[in-house]
Image: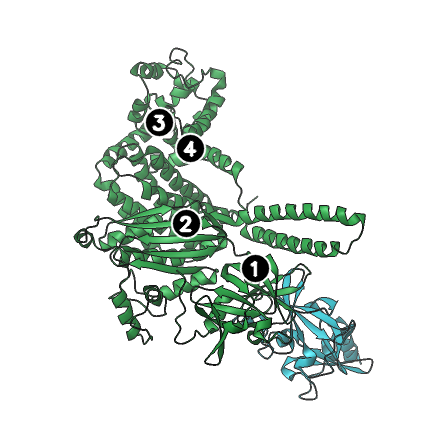
Amino acid sequence: MSANAAAAEQATNEEQQEFLTFVLGDENYALDIMTVKEIRGYENVTKIANAPDFIKGVINLRGDIVPIIDLRIKFNVGEASYNEFTIVIMLMIGERVVGIVVDEVSDVIKVKESEIKPPPEFGVAFDSAYLHGLTTVKDDMIILVNIQKLISSDELGLFDPNAQAEYE
Amino acid sequence: MSVDMSQFFGVFFEESQEHLDEMEHLLMELSLEAPDIEDLNSIFRAAHSIKGGSGVFGFDALTGLTHVMENILDLARKDELVITKTIVDQLLVTVDTLKNILHCYQNEEEINWAEIETGTIALEQLLKSDDVISADSSQTENGQKDAQNAQAKDEIEGFGLFEHPVTSNDDDFGFFEPLDPVSEEKAYGFYEDEEVKSESDAKTSAPVKTDDDGFGFFDDASGAHQIIPSDDNQSDLKQAPLSSTLSPSANKTASAKQAEPLKSTNANIKGAEKSAPRKVKSENKESSSIRVDTNKIDSLVNLVGELVITQSMIKIVGKEVQGETEEKLEGAIGELSRNIREIQEAVMSMRMLPMSFAFNRFPRVVRDLADKLGKDVNLVIEGGATEIDKGMIEKLVDPLTHLIRNSVDHGIEMPDKRKAAGKTAQGTVILSAQQRGGSILISITDDGAGLNRERILDKAIANGLDVAADIKDADVWNLIFEPGFSTAEAVTDVSGRGVGMDVVRRNIESIGGSVEIESHQGVGSVFRIRLPLTLAIVDGMCVSVGGQTYVIPLTNIIESMQPAKEQIKTLAKDKVLWVRGEYWPLVQMHKLMNIDNAKTNITDAIVVLVETSRKRFGILVDTLEGQQQVVIKSLEQHYKRVPGVAGATIMGDGSVAMILDIESIAAEVKTPSHQEVPIVS
């Protein structure tokens, strides 16, 4: 009884992490809100020659040339359509800024470490190496993405390999 | 109460570096026959400033060495030591050692005490080798002994010279204002003014000397003798009630000095005393320039770039305005763009430094190298005042050093060989910089043997390069830029090691420049480096391909044209363009950049003829959009390098356009096999 109370006590003291949830196709994802620089609408991009198709191109973010990637194309989820509701989350990964195209940004959630369950080995578009875990909010399953690891991964090839080490 | 000294370290390091550079420069300039006293003073001051600073911050390694250096220089400027080449050489070595130590402190590395020890001993040897020093040291001893005797009269002569309230000899010292006893404090401060004035005033140089010598009284009395214009005055002065004329503070200083351990030499004391004039000097400097972190300037450059873009955006929006306001708006935008252009120029000029920043180190390089090789080489520097972007200076130093070393080592022949060829024994290397339109031209000219065609060709064949026997000279010279190409017969520590000419060319191309060679057997060679004025802005031609805008740097463009059908030929399945008697290979932008919806029919498209240091070719685009100055933005900051693209820029409407890297595209271009594409001379 008292042990339970102590555990509950500990749980409330436990540090809560904030995540921004977003939708890709039918799946709910979330990423660490501390990496988010800003959220903006999708605008025309300038294509980069001979880049893979999930790298949409670059935009001018107040004078910085910033790449925009579409995770829907990379992980083959949902439909890669662009309209006035298409959202770009600008992420700050180390010193670099990268924008990701998502279908929808929904909410900010607070998650305690104890509420995070280990990621499944399959059934998710992302390689489990890039996942932080799973959590449930109001009966919805949300996949927590380790966005830093994903963006700086070789798989996306966004950065030169030598520059990559700093972000891992 | 303790102050964190480390916050001043940065300034000290920078200043010391400047002092060392100045010392090196002056030492190189110093004529051995008639050393200029002002130069010696300047070298002394530089050494002294470093010593003072290092003492304050506890950089003991610097203090010791500069101290001995100071002693030598002090004797030299008092004509008690004859400056010889050996001394200058040793002083230069010491400057190098000091640079190393400074570097160690700066990077918090281990200090090489052995090097300092050797340096100090070598310097002290110089002092000992001259019998002057014995006289000096006895004088010093005397001085100290006398100083102990409170306000000894003789030794304070020099001092009394200024402070002396007597009226009889005021006339003789016309340049000192008559002093009365109450203005003693003022008189004391008088030195500071004199120090500054003395730079030009020969007459005042005498008192300055006294001042430098720590009021003269720790020094030898003879110093004072030299200064004093007439013996009458001197005797007058001697009899003056000196102790009473000394201001309290002066008394205090004097006694404080006496309390110092005797083993400290006069130079040490001078160190403390001289801080006042030094301050005056630095204040003068500060009034005309300030130190600014380069990052701050860079961010200013960026912001102005943003401003340029914003202004173009306003201009575009302004076109939509109708009626009376349109006119007003247009006028205001015109005004704005003029102002912005001026701001831009002003900011860019802040980044500009004279080429002499890079050039000044070369007299030393040439001197050392010529000595080592037993050659006689005169380096002539022209156009050191030409201004160039700071970022480029840093990147130019290595390639320039390499080229100059090459000229001295390979270009200039040995003196006897030169005489045999009917030339003067002394070889000449001319390093010059000049501005030509939007670019800087740096040339390194030597009157040596010139490049050896046969040897280069032999080496090329040995390296497995495919060369025709009747290859043009210009193409032969360009072969030396190939990797692994050194015709030096043996690897010496001068040439033929490590970096080759390929690195030189790569470094120059990395800052948007090009290098070409002109050489004549027996007459000499010229290496010409052409560089853009700045790295941050480029004049470009905007072209459109399949709705995407690209920028081609104007420096690469020869002309643009709409090709006629009969000009297009097919060579080994590749299209080439026949223009004025030459075949130009064609690069199709939409293929290169993988763009849809571009014009694929060559006769519908526009060909932009471009040239690089290696090749000339045509680029096929849809339309030309106009010429524009663009601010270069890095793609690598948030993404990575893109092949064929030098960077990106932001257009007037806020969209991003890629700037083409013609040099790297050129590498992909196949030259028609049997058609030698001429190298532009």
Q: Are marks 4 and 1 in contact (CB under 8 Å)?
A: no
Q: Position of residue B216 (x, y in %)?
A: 35, 27
| Same-chain check, marks 1 and 2 | yes
Amino acid under disc 3: Phe
Amino acid under disc 2: Ala
Of labels 3 and 2, the one closer to you: 2
Left or right of residue A62: residue B664: left
* Residue hosting label 1: B540
Of labels 4 and 1, the one closer to you: 1
On screen, residue B318 above or below B26: below
Task: Name the subunit of mark 2.
Answer: B
Quarter of the figure that contains the N terminus of chain B: top right
Of labels 1 and 3, the one closer to you: 1
Amino acid under disc 4: Glu
How far is mark 3 from mark 4, CA to CA? Answer: 12 Å
Q: Are marks 3 and 2 in contact (CB under 8 Å)?
A: no
Q: Residue at x 83, y 80 (%)?
A: A138
How far is mark 3 from mark 2, CA to CA? Answer: 50 Å
How far is mark 4 from mark 1, CA to CA? Answer: 59 Å
Task: Name the subunit of mark 1.
Answer: B
Q: Which chain is green?
A: B
